[in-house]
Image (cartoon, grey):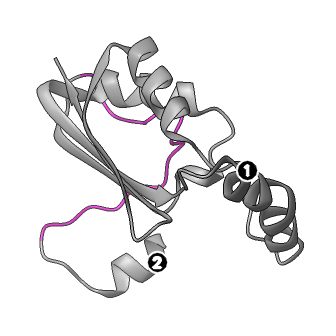
Amino acid sequence: MIEQARAKKIPGAVFVVGDCENFPFEDNSFDAIICSNSFHHYPDPQAFFDSVKRCLRPGGRLVLRDVTSASKLFVWLMDKIELPLANLCGHGDVKIATRETVVACCNNAGLKVEKFEIRKGMRMHCVVRKV
């Protein structure tokens, strides 16, 4: 994805390859962090939220978008059938996050969930703030 972003030649943009569970940035570096369609690849969701808290400035926000479902059956089917099949093609999927997982990780990191919606049945839209 970094190579695709670089190909767009966005003026002033710097693209960094790093570990999402241990961001390679200084504390209080960002007003906003956007995580779109990659969260289900992260082996340690809590480490991600801890890293987000460290790197956000006070009042900063995380916008998290990924696949999920309010249905425990659909999440189970994705985790047990869809992700393993996708991984046969090299996708690197780990686990589908539920609302409960996201809220618990945010609480543990000291972040506040401002909005959590499931749009179109399978799309998480979550906004989190560092207080």
Percent across and percent down for residue 56 are: 23, 29
17 on left or right of 76: left
Q: Quadrant of residue 110?
A: top left
Mark in front: 2 vs 1: 1
Q: Hey, what amino acid is under mark 2?
A: Glu
Whole-percent x, y for residue 92 in the image: 74, 61
Q: Check if mark 2's residue and mark 1's residue have beta carbons within 8 Å.
A: no
Numbered badge on residue 3: 2
Looking at the picture, does residue 128 appear above or below residue 82?
above
Quadrant in the picture for residue 125: bottom left
Q: Amino acid at mark 1?
A: Val
Q: Nearer the viewer, residue 18 or 83?
A: 83
The image shows residue 71, relative to residue 25, as above or below, that is: below
Q: Residue at x 13, y 67 (%)?
A: 12
Residue 126 percent coordinates (x, y): 32, 46
- Residue in front for this viewpoint, 107 or 47: 107
**Magenta stretch encompasses residue 2:** no
In the drawing, what numbered circle is on residue 78?
A: none
Q: Residues within 10 Å of mark 1 (few under 14, many from 20)?
A: some
**Residue at (50% x, 42% y) in the render:** 20
* SS class, disc 1: loop
User: Magenta stretch containing residue 18, yes or no?
Assistant: yes
Measure the C-alpha gap from mark 2 to mark 1: 23 Å
What residue sits right under mark 1 in the picture?
A: 94
Where is residue 44 shown, x and y percent of the image?
64, 32
Residue placed at 28% from the left, 86% from the top? 8
The picture quadrant where one finds residue 111 is top left
Q: Which residues are magenta?
A: 12-27
Q: Is residue 89 above or below residue 116?
A: below
Most frequent secondary structure within the magenta stretch: loop
Pick whichever, 114 or 58, lies toward us: 114
Q: Earlier in the sequence, mark 2 or mark 1?
A: 2
